Image (spheres, grey):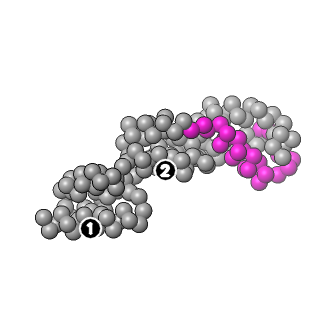
Amino acid sequence: MDNFKSKLSYALTLISKKPYTENQIQEKIYTRFNDKNNKKVINYLKEINLIDDLEYTKNFIIYKSSNSGKRKIFFQCKKKGIPKKIFDEAYTTLNIKEKPVIEELIKIKSKTYKKDISYYEFKKKIIPFLVNRGFDISDILKVLGKYKDYRSDLI
């Protein structure tokens, strides 16, 4: 029982500083106490609503969706130990629209390129940038189709 109290105290200290996923708390407790049997602590924290992976995921998606696509956010959540099922539920609940974000990133990024760059060169630079941000290539190409004469449309 004393071990439970010390694990709980440590978990509460962590959670008081910033939100954590269930998996992150389990890993932190394991590294601190070298004990994999943390179910009691995790279940107690869930009961009192201090750990909620769905709520954590929703907040994380809202925070990251202003400059990242679904794919990148998913892999970041996966690193934090959030299951795909919870991510999908949170993402569909929020109903995030990626195309306006892509348009905004294109406008911001186009200002960093030279004025005399061709549309082909612009596409050659912007597509990898947006794909690395986790956006779907089909969405990127749809948005880019609007900007054939990209300098007059973006500036």
Give above or below for 9 relative to 109. below
- Quarter of the picture holding the N terminus: bottom left
Q: Is residue 88 left or right of residue 68?
A: left
Cβ atoms at labels 1 and 2 below 8 Å apart: no
Most distant residue in the left direction: 1
Dot 2 corresponds to which residue? 60
* Measured Cα–Cα span from mark 1 to mark 2: 25 Å
Residue 115 at what x, y percent from top left?
Answer: 85, 49
Residue drawn 48% across the image and 36% down it: 93
Q: Nearer the viewer, residue 38 or 48?
A: 48
The answer to whether one can see residue 124 in this image is no
Q: Which residues are magenta?
A: 96-120
Residue 78 covered by magenta stretch? no
Q: Which mark is residue 9?
A: 1
Q: Is residue 142 left or right of residue 23?
A: right
The answer to whether one can see residue 53 in this image is yes
Q: Secondary structure at mark 1?
A: helix
Residue drawn 65% across the image and 37% down it: 99
Residue 37 at what x, y percent from top left?
Answer: 18, 56
Amino acid type, callout 2: Phe
Residue drawn 38% across the image and 65% down it: 16
Q: Is residue 107 left or right of residue 83?
A: right
Residue 114 covered by magenta stretch? yes
